[in-house]
């Protein structure tokens, strides 16, 4: 797919690239992932803003 994209939301950009090339993307119900949630509201806001920017950036690609 040309390597890992240089984007904030790189996982969604890469997934959409797979789909646009007719590759299959599967859901793995047994996968385990962790997200660290900031306990300080200021840092929580920054995290959510970064995620929102990542989604917007992915939509532009």
Image (spheres, rainbow, N blue to C red):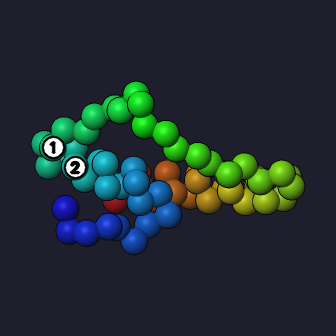
Q: In this view, does 8 lie to the left or right of 41?
A: left
Q: Position of residue 61 (x, y in %)?
A: 34, 59
What whole-number distance in Å separates the C-alpha atoms at marks 1 and 2? 5 Å
Res 18 label: 2
Q: In this view, does 6 lie to the left or right of 22?
A: right
Location of residue 24 (image quadrant): top left
Location of residue 26 (image quadrant): top left
The residue located at (77%, 53%) in the rendering is: 38
Nearer-the-camera pick, 58 or 24: 24
Q: Position of residue 14 (x, y in %)?
A: 31, 55
Res 36 label: none
Q: In this view, does 32 lie to the left or right of 23?
A: right
The residue located at (19%, 62%) in the rendering is: 1
Residue labelled with disc 1:
23
Q: Where is residue 32 in the image (x, y as percent from the top left)?
A: 49, 39
The residue located at (62%, 48%) in the rendering is: 35
Q: Where is residue 21 in the image (x, y as percent from the top left)?
A: 14, 49
Q: Do the residues labelled 1 and 2 touch (CB within 8 Å)?
A: yes
Q: In this view, does 52 lie to the left or right of 48?
A: left
Q: Which of marks 1 and 2 is nearer the N terminus?
A: 2
The residue located at (83%, 51%) in the rendering is: 39
Local packing at callout 1 (Cα closer than 10 Å; few below 14, some 14-19, many 20+) is few
Image height check: is 4 above or below 42?
A: below
Residue 39 seen: yes
């Amino acid at each position: 797919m040309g390597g890992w994209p240089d984007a904030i939301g790189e996982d969604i950009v890469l997934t959409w690239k797979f789909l646009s090339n007719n590759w299959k993307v599967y859901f793995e119900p047994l996968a385990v992932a962790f997200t660290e949630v900031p306990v300080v509201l200021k840092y929580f806001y920054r995290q959510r803003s970064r995620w929102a920017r990542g989604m917007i950036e992915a939509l532009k690609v």
